[in-house]
Image: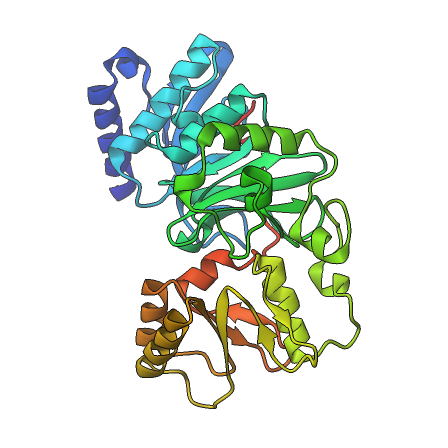
Amino acid sequence: MGNLLMYEALGERFRTRHPDLAGGLEVPRLPMLHLSVPLSGGRSVALCQMRFAKPYDYTPVWAVMGPELSEPPRIWYGTTDTDILVDVLHARAVAELAGEQEQSPWRWDEPTTGEIVELADDLAFHGVDVLMAVARNRCRAVEADRGTKAEYFGSDHGDFVVVQGQGCLIRFSRKQLSGWSAAVRAEGTGAWQRLDLGVLLLDEPSVVPGVDPGRVDRAKLAELVAGLTRSSHVPTVDGRILGRDSLSAQRSQSAYPSACPTPVERAAWELARMGFADVVPDSTCSRLESETFRIEWWSRSKSMGLGEMQRLFGVAAVEGRRLLVLSESSATRPALAFADQGKAFVFAIDPGNHRPYACNDLAKEVALDSSSWAPARGLVER
């Protein structure tokens, strides 16, 4: 009964906000409760609350489906505002009735127009196959190891678009602390690789991951993205390190140039892949060097505290450099919060494989995504 009342309330809200389709709206109870706007030929567009098949049935989401049921659903988080949900259904139904493409921002599953939606519109104008545009609505249907699931993209992913390249997926992200960044992944692999936006967009090699948003022109960025999607050679940071011209389908673990790297070499390699271009081992491979960063390798068993983080930040500031901490025991929450305020990077070093793992929010933004998701096909184009 509670579900029935919820759908009845949604129906009333739809009729109030969209009287042009109020007369055709239905609230069928079979095979499951949903809102439905009938189309011609026995077809319809529907809004319902659903869960994906096992083992991904733990997240309830709102889904707009139809008229082709074979397509992946367009999904919204379970707490999405009622007005947004009925507007989504209306936009889809109007487009289907008119035989046209949905209007922006609804075509990107977004409730408002913003920087990412405008970029997606620009890319579509250039003929780019935009698979996903994520900003305010953080929930999307993605293909995982065992089928389709709902994925919620946290703040460390930033706002982003994913486009289809030549045998690869390319993602451009705008993040709160680190700015614009880009990554590419060969289809069929789980390894994302960084693109150097400094080189591609500004003709200036980057030594710090991310490009200041104030230096990024959206029209120029759209032209760059369009060009990369048509190119069979996408220049990656990995390729530059390994002396290659384009995207390597190898996973980063197998692409490491040395069979038995020292902890310092391993850390330098992983940081270089993220975009820390001038962080390199010294001649004896005993420590890391950089002109941009003061690098502190924290090897004490006790986590770094706020006082120590502030001291190191001060030393780096006196040297005219930024702070980069590699800790074998991480750091306290106040210390990590201070690091974000000071635009310092903090990574924990895994004692087993000596790889750095992001600790503070800034470091999480520049870490490469190691997950194997891919956008569920059919979300945009029908």
Q: Which color mode does the image show?
A: rainbow
Looking at the rendered image, the quarter that the N terminus falls into is top left
Please state the horizontal and vertical placement of residue 195, each as a whole percent of the image. Answer: 61, 47
Residue 350 visible at all: yes
- 135 relative position to 285: left or right: left
Classify 236 as above or below 348: above
Front residue of this view, candidates 153 and 263? 263
Q: Position of residue 380 (x, y in %)?
A: 52, 28
Residue at (38, 24) in percent of width and height = 36
Q: Residue at x 32, y 32 (%)?
A: 85
Q: Is residue 39 above or below residue 225?
A: above
| In the foreground, 236 or 288 | 288
Vertical position of residue 177 compared to residue 87: above or below: below
* Quarter location, residue 137: top left
Where is residue 162? Give x, y as percent.
55, 38
Looking at the rendered structure, the number of numbered marks drawn on it comes to 0
Most extreme residue toward the front, as rendered?
Answer: 319
User: Looking at the image, which residue sits at the far bottom?
Assistant: 301
Identify the residue at horizontal 41%, vertical 84% (top origin): 303
Q: Residue at x 45, y 19 (%)?
A: 44
Residue 77: x %, y % from top left: 37, 44
Quarter of the image for residue 117 reads top left
Farthest right residue in view: 259
Q: Is residue 70 visible?
A: no
Choose between 77 and 121: the one closer to the eye.
121
